[in-house]
Structure formats: C-alpha cells, structure tokens
Image (cartoon, helix red, strand yellow):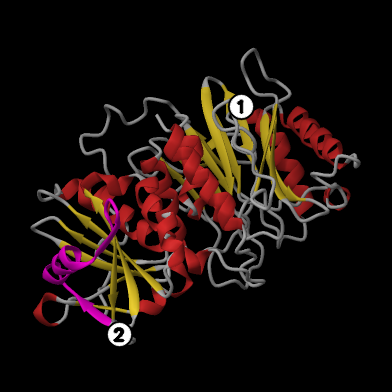
Amino acid sequence: MRIGLFLQDLANVNWEKRYNEVIKLCKKAELDLLVFPENTYCPKMDELEECYYFDDNDEGYGIIKDFVCDLSKNAGCAVLFCHFSKEDYIYSFYANEFSEDGETYNNDYCKHTATWNSPLDGRIEIDDPFFGYDFNIINLKNFKIGQTICYDSTFPLFSRMYGLNNVDILINSTGGHVDYKKWSYYQKVRAIENNCFNLCIMANMDNSRKNESYVFAYNKYGRKLPLAIVDSNGSIKKVTDNSIKDALYVFDIEKNEFNWFWENKYEDDEFLNQKATKNKNVHAYISVKRITEMISSSNKLAPNLYCVPKWNYNLILCLVHGKDILIPEKVAELEYNDDLKKIDNKRYLIVNMWDEPVKSDFYNGVLSNILKVRTVENYSALFFYDGAKELCLQTGKNKNVQVVAKEFDGSYSLDFDRMTGPEAIWRTSVQTQMRAEWREGYEDILKYILKNKK
C-alpha cells in the first residue's frame, strides 16, 4: 500500500496553491491514502470551523463528512483529514470514496489530550464490538489502520487500543515543531510495542520556531523506513531529509517487510550514548542494594507494588519484571492502582529487573528506547538492572528524558519534584490544555484493556 504524508507549510502565503497541487499529485503518484497534519489548512476551513462535531441538532458533522468525501474523490484515493470544530474538538476524519467490499468508507477519531474538549470528558464509550467509539479500525487494501492525533501518541493506551486489535499501521497527525528527540522516541516505541508500522506527519506553522517539523516512519522493529517524496511530475524521488516543507512524502508499506531481509532487524537508539548528568535538586540516593532493601522492608500494596514512607514522601515502587516493560499496560496497571489514591505525597519509581543480561542488539535497538519512554510517559524515575548493566532515568522538564549519572557507592541522585506520576499528568491546566477529570476516562480504557486483551 502506498501512503502519502503531506508536510504542509502553513507559513507559506501560497499554501492554497500548494494544497491544490498536492491533491492532483495523488493520482499521478498512485497513492492509496493521503494523510494531513493536525489542523490542516484547506480552502473551506472557515466553513468547517463553524461546524459542531457532536451537536445532534446541528448539520456540522454532515458538512465535515461531505467535505472529506469530496476531498477523497478529487485526490483519487482514501484521505485522513485533520482539523478542529466549532466546539474545539480536534478530529481526524477518514473517507474513502473508492472503498470496496470489506473496506471502510468513513471513520473518525477525536483528540483526547492537550485539547479544549475531549472524548474523555463524559463521552468515552467502550462497548463491544471490541473497542467501540473512537477506536474503530480502518480497513484499506487488506491493512488494518489506527489513528491518533498529536499528544495522544505520548499516552500509550490510546495506541494500545489499536495494537491489541492487531493493526498493521498506526498513523499520527501532529501540529508541528515538536522536539525531534522526544517525538522520535514516542513514534518508534509505539511501533515496537504494538508490533506494527507507525507513521507521523506534522506541519510547518512558523518559520521562526526553534524546532523543525518532521515526518517519522518506523516498522515494527523500530527501524526507520526509507524516505521518498513526490516531485512535480508525480515521480517518486528518494531523499534523506525528513523535514522538507510542503513535501508530499511517500511510503510503500508491505506487511511482511523486514521479516526476512535484515540480518540485524533492530536499529540502534539514535541517542544511545546520551550524556549522564547529576541532579542539582536531590531528595534521595538509590542503588541496587538500597532498592532491594526497600522492597524487602516496605509495605506491599499489591503484587509488584510497594509503598516506602521515606524522606518525608511516600515512594511508590513499581516492579516490572524483564520483558514486561515492553507492555505499557503492565506499568500503567501499577501506577493507576486504586489503592494508591488514598496515599498522599507520592513519588513514583519504576524498577525493571532482569534475571539475565540483555543481549546488546536488543538493548541498543529496542530496550533503550522503551525504558526512556516508560519514564517520561509516566512522569517518573526508572531503574534498570540485568546483573551486568544498570541505568537510572528521570523525566526531564518538558517531558524529555534525563540519564542520571552514577555517584558515590554506586548510587544515583533522585529529584522527587519530577517523579509525581499520574498526578502530574492529569491536572487541570490552561497551558497544557488538560483536565484532571479526564483521568477517569483514561483509567476506564486501562480497565478495559486489562479485562479484554488477548
């Protein structure tokens, strides 16, 4: 299947001309699916922004649907279009005017986090068949596709809802100008943990921004897919730059790609040798010995979950054994345990112990990325030990990751201010466009996954 990702340049005064050019290029390039970034610019966007998405008494949803269906007709392929509604829902709407038997004609997804309005706000419904509202699978060319929007990809359970239904491809539409290191980690890990391809497209919104906007594409082993763009004649041209403004990137996806071709199927963490640093703000020091002592002497709340009243805090130890760290709900099940809600002043430490040394290619290509993402997506610290290698990580400011340097007696310093876990994530904030009450909907998704996963 051939998928096109449009890295739209919203800062281009001639954006409408380029938009129309890209629609025409789809047929020349023989695309099966065209994907737009979050909050796409389009000729009828003023009209679309006056449409209500969830108001049963309003015709807005129908107007949006008709627009995307017409867009599919004009492009000659299926389309994933992303924009926002009158009531500030950010949606990704799929239409395929060329759908055949068994293929999806229409589908939609609404952004859950970092938004003014969310399906988590009393609208989430998780019923059979399998996942229900907002996590419906797109079927196209014998591929199963799941879709997310921007910061939803930093919350593992949204992608996991699709992964547990064996999707072949995850597609994320992002606004743009996100830190490359942070965003590449998330996209790579979502591919690995859900055993699927993961594609991400952004837009260039402002030429003065510090960060560029990128396209990311990974296979299920976390290897980058080769980059190519469509030229003005509709021909496919190989490139090495994943941040070309207004480019229409193209990826040819094969289900069995890389299963046999690569002798070494993994690709090293791009930031494998990240410099370790000491914490300036230190509340405690930990080591392998100290963690072992704390586990044996602390209050066990549930299997693999401990509370250590120490240093004027309640340190929550979440023990994740070996390869269980690859499964996001294994960590979420601990950090969102109901017994923790009655405990105040909590700080979270994920402890990942292995019974034997991890093979270097697996550590370098998979585990290094997984450990970093588990740290930042849970706003915690993490300690890894396999008998031969150990690592301490902390969530940095702006949700990037810090590798903590080893100090005296094999200890690592911890800054408890950056270990507040779900309480830091699910809090009402105008700046981050999050609400504390949305946590309940996210926990409902977790409960559903734990109950129904295969």
In this view, the residue farthest toward the top is 101
For mark 1, does the 10 Å Cα neighbourhood hold few (<14), some (14 to 19), or many (20 or more) residues? Answer: some
* Residue that mark 2 sits on: 282
Camera sees residue 1: no
The residue segment tinted magenta is 284-305
Residue at mark 1 to residue at mark 2: CA–CA distance: 57 Å
Drawn side of residue 184 relative to residue 126, left or right: left
Say which of 224 and 391 sits in front.
391
| Residue 269 image position (x, y, % from top left) | 30, 55
Disc 1 residue type (three-letter): Glu
* Residue that mark 1 sits on: 30
Looking at marks 1 and 2 on the same chain, the residue that comes earlier in the sequence is marked by 1
Image quadrant in which the C terminus is located: top left
Residue 251 among magenta residues:
no
Q: Look at the picture and state if 180 lies above or below 394.
A: above
Answer with the quarter of the image where residue 405 lies.
bottom left
Q: Nearer the viewer, mark 1 or mark 2?
A: 2
| Residue 72 image position (x, y, % from top left) | 73, 31
Determine the residue positioned at 26% across, 43% down: 266
Determine the residue positioned at 77% across, 27% down: 73
In this view, the residue farthest toward the bottom is 280
| Residue 390 image position (x, y, % from top left) | 16, 63
Camera sees residue 53: yes
Say which of 240 and 91 sits in front.
91
Q: Look at the picture and state if 271 lies above or below 345.
A: above
For the image shown, how many numbered marks are present on the structure? 2
Determine the residue positioned at 56% across, 46% down: 172
Q: Look at the picture and state if 350 lies above or below 345.
A: above
Disc 2 residue type (three-letter): Val
Determine the residue positioned at 33% across, 83% down: 312
Answer with the quarter of the image where residue 213 lies.
bottom right
